[in-house]
Image (spheres, rainbow, N blue to C red):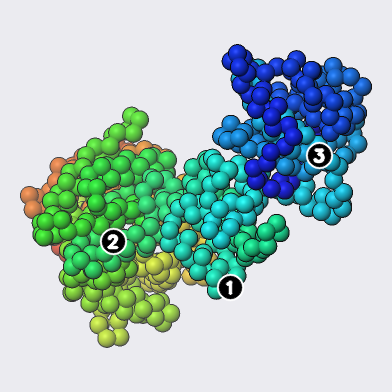
Amino acid sequence: MDAAFFPVHQDLMLSALAPSRHAGATRGDGEASTTADMETSPLQRLRTPVWLYDIDHGRILWANPAALGLWCSDTLEELCQRDMAREMSPTISQRLRQLQQDFRLHDRSSTELWTLYPRGTPRTVDIVCTGWRLPDGRMGMLCEAVGESMTDAVTLRSAEAMVHTPAMVTLYSVRGRALYRNPAARATVDHPEAGARSRVLDRRELRQLIEQLRRNGQARSTVQVSTSLGPRWHDISVRLCRDPVEGRQVFLVSEIDITELKQAEARAHWLAMRDTLTGLPNRSFVSRDFQQRLDGLHASGGEAALIFIDLDRFKAVNDSLGHDIGDRLLVEIAQRLYATLETDDLVARLGGDEFLVLVSDRDGDIERRTRQLVRRLQAELGRTVVIGRLQMQVTPSMGICRFPRDGHDIEALMRNADLALYRAKAQGNGVGWFTPELVRQARDRVQLEQDLRIAVERHQFEVHYQPRLHVGSGRLLGAEALVRWRHPRRGLVQPDVFIGLSEENGLIRAIGAMVLEKAARQQVLWQAQGRTLRISVNLSPRQFSDPALVDTIARIVRDTGCDPQQIELEITESVMLGQDDSTTLAIRQLAAMGFRLAIDDFGTGYSNLAYLQRCPISTLKIDRSFIAGERGVSPLALLVLTMCRMLGIETVAEGVETEAQLDWLRAQDCDEYQGHLCSPALPADQFERRMLELAGPAG
């Protein structure tokens, strides 16, 4: 059986079958009625089609002769064998379950407009449906076809659509009593008489709907409603209209369930506020929730501290051990960070190895609480991290500022905490507190960067040369080319002022190429004067990230006509440790062009002897800290010198300042040295006048 039906009304009715129904509900002997009783019932003689339907099993249990004719069946046995549920639509099945539930709740009949399909032929009839208790106690349905409907095609199809639509349609009286619900709406309430006032969960939103309705005659809103499945999100539209039965003003309410959409939006919003690697809140969360916390503290007169956390030398971990290990390290640090904080503290990952913590005032002494937390964070984050067979230890640097003293919004506080972090890293003490002086320094830094860009455009850089001498004989062997900035107002600016900044903003590529070209031209000039001097030039790690590095150096060789064999390129250990295929290729290409390669400041980084054999290294430069320490020459210098002799690598000691240091280097067979004992770095003309005599006779 497939049936399209439309409830015409839900008033209590007393049909002609009502006595039979009540009589069959409970017999005097306490037994439930059976279909056998109906064989001898006056129902058999009715010309109105009547049949008993088993809702649970989808079969007709009994039918009078008139019903057999309606269903186009010759015998009752044949009709009872038909599986009515097999071709029944889900909507009709749902509606029958609703009727069954209503029958259980109260003694009520329902008049429905059904379209039956006996033998595939549609027949539209008005049917009175009444609950009937079956012998086994289940609730069945007695159906009486009171007459074939003369409804036109448009009305019939609109009724069909109302039954099958997933939209929930309800007609309410002005007092909120449900006058009609289509099957989709009926499925969302536990009781057929559930009213409108208990539908919308938020009373404020209900009042707003009613107010819209009064002003405009219609209203629409997305609200959370109470349903038989629990709270759901519905898009509700309400219109004023008239009841076609009584003519009174009523409310027509249509609802669309958008719970899944709301949940998807909530999930997407949650993901948008989370860091995908660590699961911590992200920068978007900071902009919203951190600011909301600050607004609440401002209203209550509270204080807070913002802690900007950065992991020291984290880039070296990524470069030497790989990004997978770096990511696992970040996850571990994030878990420790979260576990160390109090429940009312906020934490987020900004990106990379940067984290942010907002500490709220709890006991009136925000500075004391922040210092206690900082000590705990240093201890927890500084503990050894074990990843597989690796054991690592990282230390955090922290920049701290206070609210509202150092800023009133999260963006200003983040800037100031970042300034404090920058000072902590520069001073190497791990923790920096914001002071207004840092703002002035930041402005000076911005001005310096602007001036530095102008200096690149106007070629304001000079190259000075520091002599490199043979340790044993004192003979001049070469020079290291060192850049200086001739600032129009500040005069000569030393590289420690601007090299770090130029590394950060990428200007080091242009500056490095400029220094190499000047040094190459100087090598050609001295060679023409009969002075064979090897000039060493520093290459920044940032330059190796430039895919055009080798082409740039090749162009300089062509343009200047220099001898690459008389130029030594100094690279840092970080370049060697972080080398990928492109870096390795660039190093080998430079060596193939004839350049000598030296490792600068050896021993100050993650020293790894493997790259000394893997790459064509000709020279190691021993850092000045091993030569000019407070306790004399470091034993590490002896270790490096011994290793280089075994590997056949030349050694150059930097920062030699005393004769005692030089005597020690001479005793250890160090090859070369440079430092203030001989001369500081000098402009080319002064180098020629004061130092060329150390090279001996020309040639």
Q: Amino acid at mark 2?
A: Arg
* Residue 576 locus on image (x, y percent): 38, 47
The outermost residue toward the left is 631
97 relative to 232, above or below? above
Give how far across and how far down residue 182 sits, in percent: 67, 47
For discs 1 and 2, the disc positioned in front in the rendered view: 1
> How far across and down, in percent of the image, does residue 272 sit?
46, 54
- Which residue is drawn at the image coordinates 30% and 33% (left, top)? 386
Residue beneath label 1, please? 216
Query: Can the viewer see residue 301 in this picture?
Result: yes
- Residue nearer the viewer, 344 or 592: 344
Residue identified by numbered label 2? 293
Determine the CA span between mark 1 and mark 2. 39 Å
Residue 397: percent from left, percent from top: 23, 54
- Give the label on residue 296, or none: none
143 to 695, vertically: above or below: above
Q: Say which residue appears at 11% left-offset and 60% top-offset.
A: 364
Report the residue at 33% width, 29% height from top. Answer: 389
The C terminus sits in image quarter: bottom left
Question: Which quadrant of the structure image shows residue 569?
Answer: bottom left
Q: Quick check: marks 1 and 2 in contact, CB under 8 Å?
A: no
- Is residue 427 in view from this perspective? no
Q: How many marks?
A: 3
Task: Report which residue position mark 3 lands on.
Answer: 146
State whether residue 592 is above or below residue 91: below
Tell me if mark 3 has few (under 14), some (14-19) or many (20+) residues whose alpha carbon lies within 10 angstroms of its own: some
